[in-house]
Image (tube, rainbow, N blue to C red):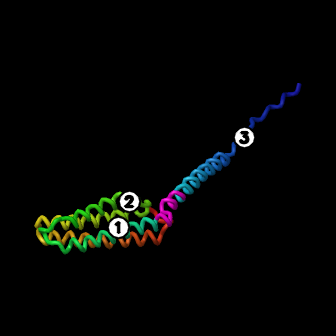
Amino acid sequence: MDKPAQLKAQEPVQKSRRFPWLASALIVLLIVATAGSYTWYSLQRSCDVDKVKDASTFLGRQLKTYDHVYQVAVTADRTSPNHPVNLLKQIFMDTQEIIVPSCMQTAKNELINYMGTVISAFEAFRAGEADATVLGLIKQSDAQYMNFHEKLKAVNKCAPFCIP
């Protein structure tokens, strides 16, 4: 009798690690691409050129009206009726309620801050506070006025690709 041939131990077959890694990478790439497309689309729509132009025009009109009333209010003395200041407050409140594209929110905030600071300056003036206090508020409002124009110009330049 012949000796039965001994079976050689077979080495285990190695599974390819490439396929699960490749599949995982493709799934992650698909998720990132989808999220990126959605983000880009959302940002583009949030700063639509027509909406930016409309909001810019409206904010500009609000500012022009506000500045006109501001010039009238400047001519009043401390004891005059506060009708011009009340009108400034109404324009201020109306401007706060304006809905603007998200990329214009900073510009709108600068305009609102400017208006609020001017009103504070008039109230300080009417209350008889020190001239230095009133002058400080006026200087602060001038900086906010300039910031508004800079932000508005920047948004009008970058629309529709502005990042809020």
Q: Is 49 a magenta residue?
A: yes
* Residue 143 appears left or right of 121: right
Q: CA distance from mark 3 to mark 2?
A: 69 Å
Q: CA distance from mark 3 to mark 1?
A: 77 Å
Q: Position of residue 67 (x, y in %)?
A: 29, 72
* Residue 132 appears left or right of 96: left
Q: Secondary structure at mark 3?
A: loop
Q: Secondary structure at mark 1?
A: helix
**N-term mark: 3 or 2:** 3
Furthest-right residue in this view:
1
Mark 3 Cα shell of 10 Å, populated few (<14), some (14-19), many (≥20): few
Residue, disc 3: 13
Q: Are marks 3 and 1 in contact (CB under 8 Å)?
A: no
Please tell me which residue is depicted at 28% across the width and 67% down the height of the picture: 114
* Mark in the foreground, 3 or 2: 2
Q: Position of residue 107 (x, y in %)?
A: 37, 66
The three-letter amino acid code for the residue at tag 1 is: Gln
**N-term mark: 3 or 1:** 3
Mark 1 Cα shell of 10 Å, populated few (<14), some (14-19), many (≥20): some
Please tell me which residue is depicted at 35% across the width and 57% down the height of the picture: 97
Residue, disc 2: 98
Q: Quadrant of residue 81?
A: bottom left
Please tell me which residue is depicted at 75% across the width and 37% down the height of the picture: 10
Q: CA distance from mark 2 to mark 1?
A: 10 Å
Instruction: Specify the quadrant that holds the C terminus.
Output: bottom left
Residue, disc 1: 62
Comparing 34 with 113, the one in front is 113
Instruction: Specify the quadrant that holds the N terminus.
Output: top right
